[in-house]
Image: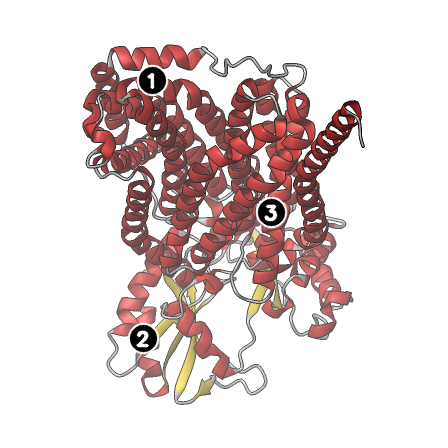
Amino acid sequence: MATSAEKTRSDEDKHESARTRTKRGRWLLPALLLIIWVVIGGVGADYQARLGEVLENSNEAFLPASAEATRVAEMKKAFETEAISPALLTFNRDGGLTEADLTYLNDKQAEIAGLKHPDLDPLGGLAERTLPVIPSEDGEAAQIIVALDAALGDKEAGVAKELRRIAGEGIPAGLEVNLTGPAGIGVDLEGVFGAIDGMLLLVTVGAVIVILLLIYRSPLMPLIVLTSSGLALTTASAVVYLLARDGVLTLDSQGQGILMVLVFGAATDYALLVVARFREELHLTANRFDAVRKSVRACVAPLFASAGTVALGLLCLLLSDLNNNRSLGPVGAIGVAASLAVTLTFLPALLALFGRASFWPFRPKHDGQPQRHGLFAKVSALVSRKPRTVWAGTLVLLLAAAAFAPQFRASGLDYVDTFTKDTESVRGLEVSAEHFPGGANLPGTIIARTEQRDEVIAAAQAVDGVARVTPTVDLETGQPKEADGLSSIDVTLRDISTSRAAQDTIVRLRDAVHAVPGADALVGGDSAALLDTRTTAEQDRWVIIPALLIVILLMLILLLRSLLAPILLTLTVAVSYAATIGVAALVFNELFEFANTDPSLPVLAFVFIAALGTDYNIFLMHRIREEAAKEGTREGTRRGLTLVGGVIVSAGVVLAATFGALAVLPLVGLVQMAFLVSFGVLLDTLIVRSLLVPALTIHIGRKFWWPSKLAKLDS
């Protein structure tokens, strides 16, 4: 029979064994999650590196099938007309070209015609594709046009660079040479977007590291958060690559850049919320595994609501008639979903691994005092003390800024105004427009019934802004091209084909040829595609913006289980956006003196500002509601703002910095996007969520939660 001491030791051994099994069990899930995500990251990294292979940047690829330019492009296939992407070399000298210049030009034309290059094999060389030197009437400029096949795709840039190299060798002193046309433009854009995987990522990561170091004053926590964000980007990029490769969605270079900054911003924002709650729980809980579990449990609802709202908001872009905007919706939603998945699984596993050491050298102590009375304790005290003054003052400020919103110009940028710095393709277009008909390198196309061809040509020639109208000729027979009773007609415009003036000419041209009885004439080409893109983008605003506001309202109703609060919060989102547009109008028009903005920009900016602004609404109001249920609306609002105000501002600063990184790319549209989203997010976090919303909540009191049960509790 066992002695009492032996039984005691046996019981202790059992308890120790149970504690060991429990401890090992607690490590099992974090370890398993880390292994799974390491595998996902390893597989996804290869797809992320190949994302550039599936980019599609042509204008016609983004237009709906119903657009006139798209219909013309489809009808041209019946004429067996090769899609031409001209490379245009312009040469000019003030005072006129010299004999030495002309000799040089003829030599270069012959050298280009005999060019041997691996990428040219599908074309059979350039001998029949290189036109003779075309001098200008004023004798100051000349052109060499190389008719490349648009089907070259990615190989076009390599050929264009070779043409630039040839033209630049042995240039006579004082002669200016520029490569432009679609091929030259493509080379310059490739140089810009080639920085997305390098410079943009470097700037984004650098900005996030600096901000996280300032927030946590810890060298380890920024690495934990960045690892989580980087894994989210890798995962999202891999999924987007596979879908774009299989033709499920279309991805352009702008979408690639936005995906990067959106994922980094969203994943970091979500991480900040979890990490803040984790630090709070470490003060209340001795065991790090329990602290992680409680933190995740507390953050699941707001994170799902937040990510769901942003994802649904982005999916509102599916209502767009522009394929690139429509695809940006699921691309962004995939990024948000990846950010949420990593934040709720991989990040908690890392926090469990490092525990309190995550915050070294300022490790949280188990002291039962999670609240830090810092800046937002003072802000919440001010809001609580003078709610009416605070909300009225901030609302007046926002409405004053919104008053300038009608001055925001979004009717489209000329290509020459697209870059923030001088580029060779822009300079070449300017030279071409000065000395030749501006659209000569990119002729438009009219498709009309053959019986009315002469009438259509006469009507087109009478249009102001049209330089030349001729039937499209078969190079082998010299006869006008016809197919299925239709004829193709080439139209050369006087203005640069990528300009707003050229688009205005297309409007007049369409009116003229559409009026020809029985001709069924349609106008296409690059200028027409740009016009259709602008028109479609303007129509999108009246569909997407109302749809997104409805989504935001419904999500807030589901989260807060009330009606009045969601309505007021949705209105603050709209006011915040209007104020941002007003400030942007002043900055763009007066400070930067931008000529215009892309017509899609207001819609895209609204989607990001409104969806992400609702993000912070959810973070704030979920915590205020939690506290109000225990301590009433006034005290719950004060305490909720104190606890999460700093997190919201930190998240806003991080998101603003990530979107602000887009400004390093020298494209006016991306600089404008960077300013709009960055300023809008900062305005929303610093003014709207930190002052206006809490002040309104306190001023209205318990009725703010009507008709939920909270409306019946003491304020």
**Can you say whether 702 is above or below 405 in the image?**
above
Q: Is mark 2 on a helix, strand or loop?
A: helix
Image position, residue 548 (x, y; %):
32, 48
For label 3, the crowd category at 10 Å Cα-Cα, with few meaning under 14, some 14 to 19 and many 20 or more, is: many
The Cα–Cα distance between marks 2 and 1, rounded to whole angstroms, is: 74 Å
| Mark 2 or mark 1, earlier in chain | 2
| Mark 1 or mark 3, earlier in chain | 3
Q: Which of 161 and 496 is in front in this view?
A: 161
The quadrant in which the N terminus is found is top right
At x 65% / y 26%, what residue is drawn?
A: 355
At x 42% / y 46%, what residue is drawn?
A: 308
Q: Name the residue under label 1.
A: 638
Frontmost of labels 1 and 3 is 1
The Cα–Cα distance between marks 2 and 3, rounded to whole angstroms, is: 43 Å
Q: What residue type is labelled 1?
A: Arg
The quadrant in which the C terminus is found is top left
Residue 563 figure quarter: top left
| Mark 2 or mark 3, earlier in chain | 3
Marks 1 and 3 in Cβ contact (< 8 Å): no
Q: Is mark 1 on a helix, strand or loop?
A: helix
The Cα–Cα distance between marks 1 and 3, rounded to whole angstroms, is: 46 Å
Q: Which of 675 and 692 is in front in this view?
A: 692
Q: Which amino acid does label 3 sit on?
A: Phe
Q: Name the residue under label 2.
A: 458
- Farthest residue to the front: give it: 1
Image position, residue 219 (x, y; %):
68, 21
**Can you say whether 43 is above or below 148 in the image?**
above
Image position, residue 271 (x, y; %):
55, 33
547 sits to left or right of 533: left
Q: What residue type is labelled 2?
A: Ala
